[in-house]
Image: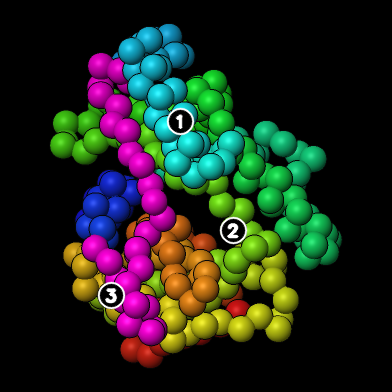
Amino acid sequence: MDINDYNLDKWFYKLQDDFVDIYQEKYKAIQDYTLLEISKDNINYFIDNREFKDIYRLQITELITSLKNKYLDSYLFFRLNTRSPKDILENKPELEILDSDDRKIKINKKIKQLEILKISNYEDIIYLLNNSKRVKEDIELFINSNTSNKLYLVFTKWKQILGNYIEYRCCIVNKKPISISLFKPEYYSSFTIIPVEIILLFLYQIVKKLDYNDYVIDVYVKNNKCYIIEINPLCEETDLFSLDYYDIINSDNLIVTL
């Protein structure tokens, strides 16, 4: 599969149906993302001007205002459907996470890093789009592509997951859940308990709805319900933390680890 097949819009629209939790109650499978398509004309204008046309700027501003009213919150989470502009975090050396930092310091630094993706207005978005190398690469790829892939601005309610919920990285191999592990285990205590049954039930429902074979799903659990953070391809370069890529792709049994 092409890497663009894992763009957020590709799996987001396939997972709109309600899922069933361990109590057989329905809940939404995903965060409440809102996608705003960017035309190639708008992208070309942005490349030339580092800014969007007034009419598109107005669209973005109105959408931000509407979502802030909907969520009763002053902040939103922002990314593209391809990738997030989180590489901007590399420009803040004072927030670099050191091996010598204890767990609480690592968590606090990471929380402050992630706040770069916390936006409240149009200007915040322009800053991220203009200063992220990842975004520039994705825009160039989109402009030079002859495929039917689309580019979107993606918004949802700002959720401070780290420190409030535990994030898990799950691997699917041949459409079968093979591993569940803590996402960045250095942030968590060795006393952390992984809710395997809750996550597994959710993963088996995801597998039925997606036509991917091998992939990684990042999820968090809240009130016995799983929520997808994102889906990405599973490959040798994937950060699997304490797990080994070849152990995962060659395993027939579920691997669970902190």
Q: In this view, does 120 lie above or below 220?
A: above
Neighbourhood count class around disc 3 (C-alpha, 10 Å): few under 14, some 14–19, many 20 upward: some
Relative height, residue 51 to residue 200 (above, below) = above
Residue 130: x %, y % from top left: 51, 22
Q: Kindly indicate whether the residue at mark 1 contacts the one at mark 2 (C-beta within 8 angstroms).
A: no
Q: What element carries label 1?
A: helix
Q: In which quarter of the image is the N terminus?
A: bottom left
Closer to the chain start, of discs 2 and 1, is 1
Tell me where the magenta segment starts and ends, as one range.
17-43
Viewer-closest of 206 and 212: 206
Q: In which quarter of the image is the C terminus?
A: bottom right
Question: Could you tell me if residue 221 is visible in this image?
Answer: yes
Indicate the secondary structure of the residue bearing disc 2.
loop
226 to 66, vertically: above or below: below
Judge depth for marks 1 and 3 and give the one in front: 1
Identified at 81% across, 57% down, the residue is 105
- Residue type at mark 3 is Gln
- At label 2, which amino acid type do we have? Ile
Between 167 and 48, the one nearer to me in the picture: 167
Residue at which label 1 appears: 64
Marks 1 and 3, how far apart in space? Answer: 32 Å
**Residue 161 badge:** 2
Residue 18 sits inside the magenta stretch:
yes
Numbered mark located on residue 205 in the image? 3
Q: In x, y percent, where is residue 16?
A: 26, 58
Q: Which amino acid does label 1 sit on?
A: Ile
**In the image, which disc is placed on residue 208?**
none
Q: Dot 3 lies on which element?
A: helix
